[in-house]
Every structure is written in structure tokens, then in C-alpha cells.
Amino acid sequence: MSMTSTISTEKFFLNAFEKTFLNSERRDILLNIANKIIEEYNNNKLVNINFICTHNSRRSQMAQVWAFFAAQYFNLNINSFSGGTEITSFNRNTIKTLQKASIKFQLDDFSHQNPKYLISFKGISKTLLVFSKRYDYKENKTPFIAITTCDNANAKCLFIPEASRRFHLPFEDPQSSENTELRDKKYLEINEKIAAEIYFIFLEINKKRH
């Protein structure tokens, strides 16, 4: 289920960062996350990050995908994972908006309820398997830095024993635009915002790694 795009993944990533305005409060949150990741990275030379949202369908998946790409782009030994407080499926509109950044999706394991996809990027040899799962899924390597991307998941996950550190980085839910004329625009806006903020975090890590 690949889809061609006129913009490369790298260009989308860079453009998103360049066009996104970060106010001082948001920059402080991102810098705090980056600095704590740097501490672990410089101590262990490896970091696992787990993006957690309620359904692991939209925002947490986008964050995992962009963190995976950023780790390859900046040549950092960082693993990105995602999970939910419950299992649903990788939302099809999330797939469509990621495909607009030339991210290729290949069906790996078909399931009406929760299909698995193998995604790839031009110029990057590694691939990423994506599907909806709980945040404590056995293949989400521990310990991990937990980043909740929605208020509901942050409230439900009062304690995450596998997390070495925990941060709350909420994004607007594109689900609110479903069945409206603004759906594609809203998904793209949130995709760009997540890509931009992941770029900001990983750029800081790259600057300060030993």
C-alpha cells in the first residue's frame, strides 16, 4: 500500500522543523526531554524511548516513526517504541499522512482488527514494524524513557515501572477532524508538528552527545 509523494522524507522532516513555531514554554519542555535523554545516552550509549497514547493509533505512532527516522538521520543509538493503554489499530488516516512524507508502508501481517506494517524510508536501510500494542508489549525494550502524547494516557498511567524517566508531551488529537472536510489538513498539521518537535529533541541530543 505504498503511495508516492513529491517531497522526500528528509525534506519533509527539515521543512516541518523550519516552519514550526515553538513558544518558550514548549521549547523548555522539549529541552528538558532532550537533556535527560542526553544524560542517559552519554552514560549508556543507548536509549530506549516509548511514546504512549491511549489507543496507539495516531499521535504515539507518528512520534515513534519520526523518532526512528531521526535516530537514523543523526546516527544515534536510540530505539523508538510506542504503545497504548489499550490496543486498537494503526489508524488509516495516520498512514495516509505519513505517506505524504514519502514513508512507505508494506502490509506485513493482515488482520481486520490490527494489521501490521513494515515501513521504510529512502536512503535508510533499517525498517520499522508498526501496529497497535500496549505500552508494556514484550518487544518494547526496557528500561525506557516514557513520553505520553495525550492527556488521557498521562492520567491513566500513574506509574510505569519500566520507565527510567517519564515526560508528558501532549499533541492535539487529529481524531476530532474525522468525517470533516478538514481531516487531511488537520492530520498533516499534527504530523508536521510532531516531526518538528522530534527534530528539535534529536538535534539537541546530537549537539551534546559525547
Image (cartoon, helix red, strand yellow):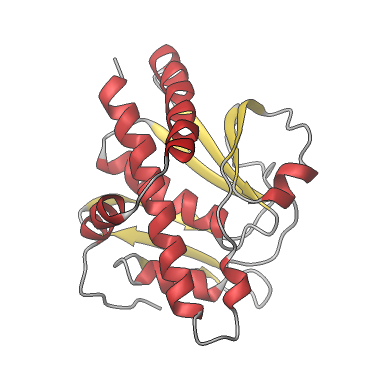
| Residue at the extreme top of the image, as rendered | 43
| Residue at the extreme front of the image, as rendered | 24
120 above or below 141?
below
Name the residue rendered at 30%, 35% in the picture: 203
Q: Nearer the viewer, residue 42 or 178?
A: 178
User: x, y (%) of residue 50?
Assistant: 57, 40
The quarter of the displayed image where residue 24 is located? top left
Residue 106 visible in rendering: no
152 above or below 38?
below
Q: Nearer the viewer, residue 199 or 85?
A: 199
Q: Nearer the viewer, residue 124 or 157?
A: 157
Dividing the image into 4 quarters, which one contains the C terminus? top left
Name the residue rendered at 28%, 56% in the picture: 19
The quarter of the displayed image where residue 158 is located? top right
Name the residue rendered at 68%, 59% in the picture: 55
Name the residue rendered at 48%, 26% in the picture: 32
28 above or below 130?
above
User: x, y (%) of residue 209?
Assistant: 31, 20
118 above or below 60?
below
Q: In the rendered picture of this protein, how many numbered marks are placed on residues? A: 0
User: x, y (%) of residue 178?
Assistant: 60, 79
Residue 10 visible in rendering: yes
Residue 152 relative to residue 92: left or right: right
Dividing the image into 4 quarters, which one contains the N terminus? bottom left
User: x, y (%) of residue 154?
Assistant: 71, 43
